[in-house]
Amino acid sequence: MISFVSGRVAAVTPDSVIVEVGGFGVQLLATPATIARARVGERARFATSLVVREDSLTLYGFADDDERTVFELLQTASGVGPRLALAMLGVHSPTALRAAVATEDVKALALVPGIGRKTAQRIILELKDRLGTPSTAAAESTSGWRDAVHAGLLNLGYTARQADEAIAAIAGELDDSAAVDTATALRLALATLKRP
């Protein structure tokens, strides 16, 4: 198992980060929030999970160990593979996922593409005791989402002006929310933009 990857961020794509490690470019599939934090040219450290399949070795990268742990626990539920687990972390933070499972919030889990009502119920049933309860100390901060989304859009090749316009377009919708998830904000901002 490869526990983490540390090195200079060589490139950022919409669904991955490429880190230069010992002369090699290692591609890490990651959530939008993790990608938004990566800065091309700067050193970064990502917790990783290696998924071995008959035809591929895929490395998934995470902002921290907690995100990786939740990713691995999600895959223990029947019908949840690495792509769906990553999609779940792309829509919800680890804390939000724990809260959704602990409170049996089927609607929150069904927001993830590929998860319907029955799948959400099965995930709740199978993971309720394993995923743990959300920590109030780990609750996401509502401040700083603008900076993270701005940096993420710049890393994806958008101009500062385009990033500012996208943030302004979604700010009214998100400022009324109790908590703003960076991944959700980045996804909404991307939806308002066309690729340069």
Image: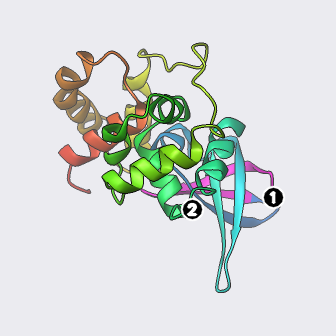
Name the outermost residue toward the front.
125
Kindly identify the residue that appears in the image at 63 percent across and 37 percent down: 129
- Kindly identify which residue carries mark 1: 2
Q: Nearer the viewer, residue 40 or 123?
A: 123
Judge whether residue 19 is colored magenta: yes
Is there any visible trace of residue 156 in the rendered image? no
Q: Nearer the viewer, residue 102 or 35?
A: 102
Q: Nearer the viewer, mark 2 or mark 1?
A: 2
Is there any visible trace of residue 92 in the rendered image? yes
Tell me how the rendering is colored: rainbow
Q: Quadrant of the N terminus?
A: bottom right
Kindly identify the residue that appears in the image at 52 percent across and 58 percent down: 16
> How many angstroms separate mark 2 from mark 1 (CA)?
16 Å
The image shows residue 2 at horizontal and vertical percentages of 81, 58
Under mark 2, the amino acid is Pro
- Kindly identify which residue carries mark 2: 82
Kindly identify the residue that appears in the image at 47 percent across and 59 percent down: 84
Q: Vertical placement of 24 versus 91: above or below?
A: below
Is 43 situated left or right of 155 in this image?
A: right
Mostly what secondary structure, the magenta segment?
A: strand
* Secondary element type, mark 1: loop
Question: What stretch of residues is rendered in magenta?
Answer: 1-20
Q: Vertical placement of 189 versus 61: above or below?
A: above
Q: Vertical placement of 77 versus 163: above or below?
A: below
Q: Report the label total.
A: 2
